[in-house]
Structures are given as C-alpha cells and as structure tokens.
Image: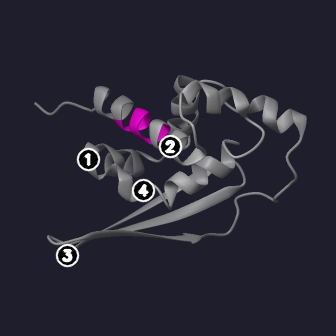
Amino acid sequence: MVHAGLRLSFGVATLLLSACTSNASESVKAQPATPTSPASSSSQTDAASLPKTVEEAVTYVIKRMSPEDQAKVRATPKDDLIRFHRTWGSGLRNDLGLWKGNDALFKATGAKHPDDASMVIIEAIWARLNETAPTTP
C-alpha cells in the first residue's frame, strides 16, 4: 500500500487530501484543516477576483500549489484523477464559486453541473502540469 498526502490551499480554505492506494482499490479521504485566513462572506470584490476561464483557473490553482503537490498530481494517471472528485474537487467547487457566484467560470467549463466543472478543471491542471513536467537528463 502506498500513502501520499496532498495539501492544497484555495482562498480561505485548506484541504488535506490523503490518498491510499493499493493494487485492488483506491480511496481518497479529505479533512478540513485550519483555514489559512478568517472566513468571510462572498462579496462582489471576492467574486470579481476569481478566475473566469478554465485557463485562468488552472493558473490560479497551480500558483497556490507546492512543488510537492504539483509532482503528486503530475504523477497521477489521468484515468485516476476521479479519485480527487469528492475531496479536491469539492474544494475547487466551493472556493472557485462553481456552485454559486462564478457563472463565467462555470460556463467556460462547458459542464452542466458543478461536479463536472471541477473535473474539467482538475484535468486541465493535470494536463498543464504534464506539459511543463521537468525533464530528466
């Protein structure tokens, strides 16, 4: 069994993603961690500062990821990204306003539901990280 932890910050929330992988099955568990800053109600200014396109969302999220977290996402096979749906995906849906407040980003994903929209973003993050993967000599 392999254990890999993934800690990502988005706005005021921090998620701790812990993936336990075995040959037979995979599971991901999330635990809310201490917020990085005081929680505040969503304001027009907050909504205005959120990314409006998938490309902007990818840049926004990757800038907030540690090199270790980037490596963990990069190393995840594309077909296994679904394991992040309930954990990291939930943080993306909430913090990027996919449920409420960021209609532009939601529409830009082309998805019909916020769950699907977050997977579009996760897959786009994975693709960007794999495009820019460091090469080894």
Instruction: Give the class, few, some or many, for how many residues have Cα within 10 Å of label 2's Cα (few <14, many ≥20).
Output: some
Residue 63 horizontal/vertical position (percent):
54, 36
The residue that disc 4 covers is 84
Separation (CA) of disc 2 from disc 1: 15 Å
What secondary structure is marked by label 1? helix
Q: Eyeballing the image, is 113 above or below 17?
A: above
Tag 3 or tag 4, which sits nearer the N-term?
3
Tell me what residue is drawn at x 85 percent, y 46 percent.
Answer: 42
Amino acid carrying label 3: it is Met
The residue that disc 1 covers is 79
Tell me what residue is drawn at x 56 percent, y 62 percent.
Answer: 15
What secondary structure is marked by label 3? loop
Could you tell whether 68 is left or right of 57 in the image?
A: left
Separation (CA) of disc 3 from disc 1: 19 Å
Could you tell whether 134 is left or right of 90 in the image?
A: left
Asked if residue 76 can be seen in this view, the reply is: no
Span of residues in magenta: 121-126
Tag 1 or tag 4, which sits nearer the N-term?
1
The residue that disc 3 covers is 1
**Picture quadrant where residue 126 is located:** top left
What secondary structure is marked by label 4? helix
Q: Eyeballing the image, is 109 above or below 21?
A: above
Instruction: Give the class, few, some or many, for how many residues have Cα within 10 Å of label 1's Cα (few <14, many ≥20).
Output: few
Amino acid carrying label 2: it is Asp
